DNA sequence: AAATTTATGAAGTAAAACTACATATTTTTT
DNA sequence: AAAAAATATGTAGTTTTACTTCATAAATTT
């Protein structure tokens, strides 16, 4: 926690009355704070300079100067959301910037949603799996495929099923120690929920990757991982969500690979060599 | 330009001697600046408080206080690159943070590489295409598939070919007004280069999406789009590059969709309806 | 209701930021 | 090369700001 505004928000219940007044004002007028003197702030909050100093100490700062700096830094880190979406007035540069921000935002939101415990449990299951099935359709099918590409490289037997019938026939044959990994942004794609259900009944450990919130898939799976549920822009279905999903796959892959590091290194080198033979240049 | 450290670096030649000393010190000890008093800074630079104030005014600030705040903000915005990659000492939270930063960085680097003119030419070609072929293998094949999903939604006839033989047989049948879109991170994947070559000879407009720099694919294609060529971490092949590639696809898609907005809206609504029928919940 | 603890602001202090001006340095002109 | 002009810089003083101390007020406990 090195974001002072969040720290203030969190600590709110523990404040004394005068401190609470200051906290409220700072949160609501964060942009002003770094321009005000301690005296001006005290007046604006109907309190005294001494209370402002006490407030700073309470939240763990040396003094008012540090508050001003920390608030400015905290504000600068908040990337501005593109609320209005993309309009006709935007020129090409604006559109590029907005989409980039949108995707970066999706990554940020997603990692702040990630439950560390769930991640570790998923990594544990994946690292020890004798076999992994990834299920997904459409955009999420692509993520399943990406996951397969990655985990194959470290010699973990895995398959990505985008075909809903194959998903079911594979799921029914899973065993204890296998992992079924269901990817569905909505968490409500009928076939994926069914496949995970079947996999679970067959004894496999089941993992879901969906948007944040309750959904049939979340209810079914043993371990649930979430991406930010922010709406897509421009009615375009999976926009940022697949970037967020891929980032989660990256995280799982790296953690699994690191867990098995010693045995893993040689597989990565092997696959690199094979691939470079297919290139025109080294 | 609202990054004070960059501003100072830029303005360096125009400084008076004493200001230059201060500029040098600030750039080299940026982390210290917000902890120092004007007096301490003046001493550290072997100059006077007055010169420090003058320095602040010269770079467009109100005074020393503002300098401290702006420097702290500027520093906080510099996302720390994970030079050392991921080590055994990193805990799960560190790994998550580093991967998120890595992917965000890839997006940033990529959009700063994007040539607006090339983007506009690509959009022009895609928007007017009677048919689009996307070619890619492995991770880039996934990106091709993603592109197909998107452009299909706005009723542009397109296909993603991951099979190298199908790529060639489709390419040879392309005509003027069609677009062949080759995706290859290295730009040196033999089959993709060949397919684009064939497509070009058949009369299609060819677009490449590769890492920045020269490559056989870049030499062949009519329009070249680049993603950041930063090295992958942890020997893991396509890590951030596919996120960057997907972001470029997003940009192209949005720009094409906007260009054809009026006719496009109804297609997006149609596809949304069809998809929601496959969900358990609305 | 009294005693104790806790919270708060007024007044005072020290230190910081900033200003004005005199002096030093550099540049230009003769 | 010397004088004059312009520019750059530091010293000393002023104002403002941040912070401290302590007395008083409010709340809590006994």
Image (cartoon, coloured by chain):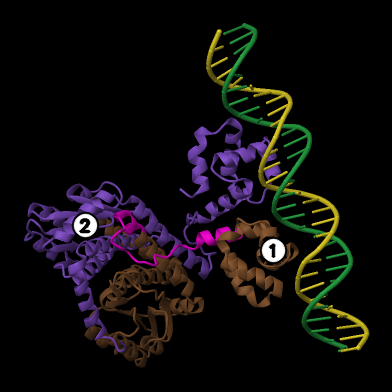
Chain colours: A brown, B purple, C yellow, D green
Is residue A1 visible to the viewer in this orientation of the structure? no
Report the front residue among B146 and A90: A90
Per the image, label 1 sits on a secondary structure element best described as helix
- Tell me where residue A70 sits by quadrant: bottom right
Task: Tell me the residue at 67%/37% (across/down).
Answer: B50
- Disc 2 is placed on an element classified as helix
Residue A31, label in figure: none
Q: Position of residue B200 (x, y in %)?
A: 11, 53
Indicate whether residue B71 is drawn in magenta.
no
Q: Is residue B66 left or right of residue B132?
A: right
Q: Chain of mark 1?
A: A
Q: Chain of mark 2?
A: B
Local crowd size for mark 2, using a 10 Å CA cut-off: few (<14), some (14–19), many (≥20): many
Above or below, comparing residue A169 to residue B63 in the picture: below
Residue at 20% of width from left, 68% of height from top? Answer: B262
Q: Which residues are magenta?
A: A70-97
For residue B123, the mark is 2
Task: Report x, y in % for residue A153.
Answer: 34, 67
Provide the residue designation for mark 1.
A42
Q: Is residue A209 left or right of residue A45?
A: left
For marks 2 and 1, give the one nearer the viewer. Answer: 1
Q: Nearer the viewer, residue D26 or A268?
A: D26
- Marker count (numbered): 2
Identity of the residue drawn at 28% across and 71% down = A236
Please tell me if label 2 and label 1 are on a single chain.
Answer: no
């Amino acid at each position: 926690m090195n974001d002072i505004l969040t720290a203030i928000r969190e600590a709110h219940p523990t404040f004394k009355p005068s401190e609470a007044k200051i906290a409220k004002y700072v949160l609501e007028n964060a942009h002003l704070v770094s321009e005000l003197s301690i005296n001006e702030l005290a007046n604006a909050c109907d309190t005294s300079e001494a209370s402002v100093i006490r407030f700073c100490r309470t939240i763990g700062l040396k003094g008012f100067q540090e508050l001003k700096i920390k608030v400015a830094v905290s504000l600068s880190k908040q990337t501005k959301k593109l609320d209005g979406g993309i309009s006709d007035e935007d020129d090409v540069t604006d559109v590029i910037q907005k989409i980039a921000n949108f995707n970066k935002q999706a990554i940020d939101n997603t990692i702040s949603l990630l439950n560390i415990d769930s991640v570790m449990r998923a990594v544990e299951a994946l690292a020890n799996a004798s076999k992994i099935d990834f299920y997904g359709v459409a955009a999420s099918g692509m993520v399943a495929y990406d996951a397969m590409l990655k985990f194959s490289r470290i010699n973990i037997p895995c398959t990505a099923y985008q075909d809903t019938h194959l998903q079911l026939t594979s799921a029914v044959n899973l065993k204890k120690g296998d992992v079924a990994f269901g990817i569905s942004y909505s968490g409500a794609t009928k076939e994926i929920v069914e496949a995970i259900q079947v996999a679970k009944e067959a004894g496999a450990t089941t993992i879901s990757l969906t948007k944040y919130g309750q959904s049939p898939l979340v209810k079914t799976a043993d371990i649930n991982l979430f991406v930010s549920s922010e709406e897509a822009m421009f009615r375009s279905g999976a926009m940022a969500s697949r970037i967020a999903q891929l980032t989660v796959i990256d995280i799982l892959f790296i953690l699994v690979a690191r867990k098995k590091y010693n045995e893993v290194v040689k597989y990565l080198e092997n696959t690199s060599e094979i691939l470079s033979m297919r290139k025109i240049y080294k």
